[in-house]
Image: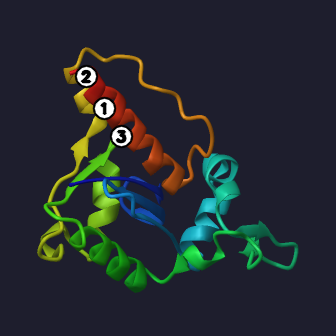
């Protein structure tokens, strides 16, 4: 069964810091989680592209009191904020609750690294979590690189992007 997913992250050429992850299973289950790691969110606020495109979808708000930001406990996604260990456990449980899981992402190389790093190294993946992510962009190329549907809203929100990945996959499947 397919799981479409997306991550938002900050990377510096050496490390990838997970900001958020969204997953949509073929059976309709969804998961959206945001890291509570202050250094990661602070670095994202300092990064102009992330500040413009990713931060607006997170349960944070600018702060005028000595820091760049603060958690917005009134945000609809406030309950999505979790520790790295909780995120790893919830993602593992989500994937393992899926019979014969297949992971799918759009340009998914960094997404897969961010996913693996929830547990440390790639060889530390929990038993049953796939060791690779199928790439929707590669599938589109295989099919002649058709123009895929545009995302109507929510771009760079990991859950909205995961939902859009499902729509892209369904579009590509309709071409076969």
Q: Residue at x 26, y 66 (%)?
A: 116
Say what secondary structure mark 2 lies in. Answer: helix
Q: Which quadrant does the C terminus fall into?
A: top left
Where residue 93 appears, as percent x and y from the top left, is 29, 77
Instruction: Measure how far apart labels 2 and 1 are at the Cα level.
Output: 6 Å
Instruction: Answer with left or right where residue 92 lies relative to residue 21.
Output: left
Q: Which residue is mark 3?
A: 106
- Looking at the rendered structure, which numbered label has been put on residue 141? 2
Q: Marks 1 and 3: CB-CB under 8 Å?
A: yes
Residue 15 tag number:
none
129 sits to left or right of 52: left
Identify whether 12 is placed above or below 60: above
Give the Cα separation between the discs numbered 3 and 2.
12 Å
Residue 156's x, y, as percent? 56, 48
Q: Quadrant of residue 148?
A: top left
Measured in 3D between alpha carbons, the distance from the residue under mark 1 to the one under mark 3, in whole angstroms, is: 6 Å
Pointer 2 and pointer 1: residues touching (CB < 8 Å)? yes
Specify the quadrant of the image occupied by residue 70: bottom right
Q: Residue furthest front?
A: 27
Residue 45 in the image: x percent, y percent?
A: 67, 61
Q: Which residue is denoted by mark 1 in the rendering?
A: 137
């Amino acid at each position: 069964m397919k799981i479409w997913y997306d991550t938002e992250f900050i990377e510096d050429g050496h490390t990838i810091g997970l900001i958020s992850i969204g997953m949509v299973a073929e059976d309709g289950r969804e998961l959206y989680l945001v890291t509570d790691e202050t250094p990661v969110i602070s670095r994202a606020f300092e990064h102009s592209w992330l500040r413009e495109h990713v931060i607006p979808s997170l349960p944070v708000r600018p702060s005028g009191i000595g820091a760049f930001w603060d958690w917005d406990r009134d945000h609809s996604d406030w309950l999505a904020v979790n520790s790295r260990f909780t995120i790893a456990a919830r993602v593992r449980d989500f994937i393992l609750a899926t019979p014969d899981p297949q992971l799918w992402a759009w340009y998914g190389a960094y997404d897969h690294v961010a996913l693996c790093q929830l547990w440390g190294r790639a060889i530390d993946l929990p038993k049953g979590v796939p060791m690779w992510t199928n790439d929707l962009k590669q599938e589109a190329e295989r099919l002649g690189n058709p123009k895929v549907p545009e995302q109507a809203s929510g771009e760079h929100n990991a859950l909205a992007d995961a939902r859009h990945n499902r729509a892209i996959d369904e579009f590509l499947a309709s071409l076969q």
